[in-house]
Image (spheres, rainbow, N blue to C red):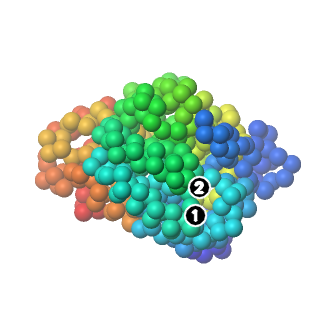
Amino acid sequence: MSHGFDRREFLQRSAVASLALAAGPAAAADATPRIRRQITLGRTGLRVGDIGFGSSDLRDDERLVHHALDRGIDYFDTADSYTGGVSETTMGKALRGRRDQIVLVTKAKLRATDRKQDMMAKLEGSLRRLQTDHVDVYFNHAVNEIERLSNPEWHEFNALAKQQGKIRFVGMSGHSGLLIDCIDYVTEHDLVDVLLVAFNFGQDPAFYERVLKRLDLIALQPKLPAALSRAKAKGIGVVAMKTLRGASHQDLAPFQQDGRTFAQAAFRWVLSHPSVDSLIVTMKSPAQIDEYLGASGWTRTAASDARALARYEAREGQRQCRYGCSSCSSACPAGVEISEVLRTRMYAEDYGSLDLAQSEYAGIGTNAAACLSCSGQPCATACPHGLPISELTGRTARLLS
C-alpha cells in the first residue's frame, strides 16, 4: 500500500484539522488526531479507546498498524478469515514487543456441529499467526442461529480455553437477520462478556423519529437498541461495527459539513448512544485513520450531523439492509438467505472489498442463485423499508457467483 497522499487523503487530513479547530468535546490544544477518550468495556474491566482498529482488509502493511498505535489506538480486531489469515499474520508481526500495551481480539465461526477440539484448533491457529499466547476476547463470529450458542461443546471450549489462559473473555459477533434473538439469548443465559454488533444510525428508531419524518421515509425499525440496552444492563461490553452504513467506498463529499466528514458524523451518532461502549472500523490508510479519530472523544452529536446523515439516508437508504431486521426471512420460497446476500453486496459494491465479498458469499448456506431465474414477485413487498430485494440479490448473484 502506498502511503503517499493523494487528493482524497489531503482533503481528509484537512477535515481532521478543521474538526480540531471547531469547538466541541473532542477539541484539544494540539490538532494531532489521536484517541481522546478511554472507556471500560463492560464487566471485563478492559480499558480501551472509543475507536478501535478493524483489519478486514489488512495485508502485509505493518506500518499501518504502527500508525494506529502511534495515534493511541489500543483495541485491535481481526479474524481468522480476514484476507485468508494474512490479517492475523500481519497483526502479529506489527504488534511484536507491544502486545502488553493493547487489547487484541480475534474471531472464528464456531458452528453448531463443531466439537471443542475443532474450536481449540481454530483458536491455536489464530494464536500462532498473531504470535501471542492469548487473546483478550475471542468471538464466535457472525452468529445468526441460536444453535451455535446453545452448543454445549462451545461452552466447554470456552471454559477450557479460559482455564488454559488462551482467552480472557468470551464474545459473540453478529450482523444478520436473527441478531436480536441471538443477543437476547446470550444475555438471558449469561454466555458472553462482550458483544460485537452491527449498529449505525439506520438501526436507531430515534434517528427516524427526530430527523427523517419530515422526508416521508419509512421509520419502521428493528428493536436492536432495546436488545443492546438489556445486554449493557447485564454488564456486557458492547462494541459497534458496520457504523458507516455501507459508506466505506462511496463519494461522501456531499455529506460533509463545516469541516466535519460523514464518517465522523456517523461515529458520533454511535458513540453518543447510551448502550454502546466503543466502535471498530476497518482502517485502510494513515489519512483514513486520522480522519476517523476526529470523532474520538465525542459523546454527543455535532450540530451539523443530523443534516449530513439525513441526506445520506435519502440517497443510499434504498440499498442498505437494516441489521437485525428479519422481516424478509421467510419471503423466498427457495430459502435464499436474503440479509446475508445483501451483506455481501455491501462488501463488494460499497466497501470495494471483492475478495471478502466472494468469500462470505461462498459461505452462505442458500445464496442468491435462485434469484437469477425468479420473477421477483415472492419478495417484492417483503421489506418493510422498501428495498428492491430481487434487484439487489440478483445483482449480487451475477457479481459474486
The amino acid marked with disc number 1 is Thr
Q: For the point 40% across and 45% down, which residue is it?
A: 156
Q: CA distance from mark 1 to mark 2?
A: 10 Å
Q: For the point 18% across and 41% down, which residue is it?
A: 332
Residue 304 rendering spot, x and y as whole percentages: 65, 37
Q: Which residue is mark 2?
A: 104
Above or below, comparing residue 59 to residue 192 in the picture:
below
Q: Is residue 12 left or right of residue 164?
A: right
Residue 245 rendering spot, x and y as whole percentages: 48, 45
Callout in the foreground (1, 2) = 1
Q: Which residue is mark 1?
A: 132
Q: For the point 25% across and 46% down, which residue is it?
A: 337
Which sits in the foreground, 54 or 123?
123
Which sits in the foreground, 188 or 279?
188
User: What crowding class fits label 1: few (fewer than 14 Cα within 10 Å), some (14-19), or many (20 or more)?
Assistant: some
Residue 203 rendering spot, x and y as whole percentages: 46, 34
